[in-house]
């Protein structure tokens, strides 16, 4: 257990992951209900959504370990699996054990949720296989990013389905929120791969190395801007466009300020700041969309 606890701290840190997944899943369910003018589901719905997204994100980590096993062995020997802390087989077995748990959760909730779960797994399988063209895809980093982040809207469709499936179909404006999940996934992925110059190493793909710190930061900032626009769209659909714009503007300023600092001086401090701010931005988006309307309704 000590070995696996060390593994999670390095590769699937629960301290950072659990709060973000809790807000993400709860916000998805709440937004779906508020948009349709329905009361939010009971605690069972929120627990089902959280448990499913937690299992899925762990499965994402396991699939990444499989996909990156060769590169990790050659270029990142300090990671838990290459250095022998745990074996790839142990992690894969752990991931496989979560599959029946997710199936049971989806079947217990019913209403066809299992089919949305199957859709997520189908895309995850394609991602793990690099869509059958790993070299071609890796040579096209933008397409690689977009194809892998496409799983985020599918996960969000599953989460919102916990709320809307019993009622037949999602509210049309829910598309704004699902697209927000796609943009936020890109913000997180780009933000964690803007590295300091001294952190770059041979064989490790980062956007800062691929495009240079300034251009990579500009792309990251563009996705933050897209995320902000989509958050405002969600706010308008919920009837709180102005308030969402004001809240989001404060977070947008912090993101752009952090990105500018990194672009000017891509050191370790800037690297860590952008990674942290990316996570906080995503947290702010979901907290605003999911809970501000409920708080305003309550008062």
Image (tube, grey):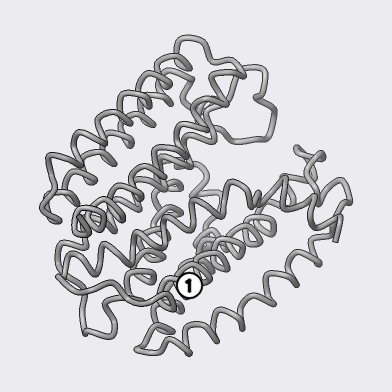
- Which image quadrant is residue 159 in? bottom left
Label 1 sits on a secondary structure element that is: helix
Instruction: Kindly give the residue lying farthest to the front in the view shown.
Output: 299
Q: Position of residue 200 (x, y in %)?
A: 65, 25
Horizontally, residue 59 falls left or right of residue 261, namely right
Horizontally, residue 36 falls left or right of residue 110, namely left
Q: Quadrant of the C terminus?
A: bottom left
Q: Residue at x 82, y 40 (%)?
A: 77
Residue matched to label 1: 47
The local crowd at label 1, few if under 14, some if 14 to 19, many if 20 or more residues have their Cα within 10 Å, is some
Q: Residue at x 42, y 71 (%)?
A: 46
Q: Position of residue 111 (x, y in %)?
A: 34, 89
- Which image quadrant is residue 226 in? top left
Which sits in the foreground, 274 or 87?
A: 274
- Which image quadrant is residue 92 in? bottom right
Q: Quadrant of the N terminus?
A: bottom right
Which sits in the foreground, 55 or 235?
A: 235
Horizontally, residue 206 falls left or right of residue 75, namely left
Q: Relative to 149, say whether 139 is above or below.
A: above
Q: Residue at x 56, y 24 (%)?
A: 271
Q: Residue at x 28, y 85 (%)?
A: 166
Q: Position of residue 51 (x, y in %)?
A: 53, 70
């Amino acid at each position: 257990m000590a070995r696996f606890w060390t593994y999670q701290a390095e590769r699937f840190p629960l301290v950072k992951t659990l709060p973000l997944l809790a807000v993400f899943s709860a916000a998805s369910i709440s937004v779906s209900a508020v948009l349709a003018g329905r009361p939010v589901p009971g605690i069972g719905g929120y627990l089902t959504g959280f448990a499913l997204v937690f299992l899925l994100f762990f499965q994402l980590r396991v699939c990444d370990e499989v996909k990156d096993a060769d590169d990790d062995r050659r270029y990142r020997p300090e990671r838990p699996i290459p250095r022998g802390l745990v074996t790839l087989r142990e992690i894969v077995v752990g991931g496989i054990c979560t599959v029946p748990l997710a199936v049971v959760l989806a079947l217990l909730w019913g209403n066809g949720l299992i089919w949305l779960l199957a859709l997520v797994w189908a895309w995850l399988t394609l991602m793990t296989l690099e869509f059958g063209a790993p070299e071609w895809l890796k040579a096209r980093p933008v397409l690689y990013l977009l194809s892998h982040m496409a799983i985020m809207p599918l996960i969000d469709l599953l989460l919102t389905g916990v709320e809307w499936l019993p009622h037949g179909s999602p509210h049309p404006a829910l598309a704004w929120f699902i697209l927000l999940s796609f943009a936020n996934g890109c913000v997180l992925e780009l933000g964690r791969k803007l590295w300091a110059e001294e952190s770059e190493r041979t064989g490790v793909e980062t956007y800062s190395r691929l495009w240079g710190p300034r251009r990579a930061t500009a792309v990251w900032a563009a996705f933050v801007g897209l995320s902000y626009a989509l958050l405002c769209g969600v706010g308008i659909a919920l009837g709180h466009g102005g308030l969402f714009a004001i809240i989001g503007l404060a977070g947008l300023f912090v993101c752009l300020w952090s990105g500018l600092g990194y672009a000017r001086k891509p050191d370790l401090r800037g690297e860590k700041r952008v990674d942290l701010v990316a996570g906080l931005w995503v947290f702010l988006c979901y907290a605003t969309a999911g809970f501000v309307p409920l708080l305003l309704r309550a008062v």
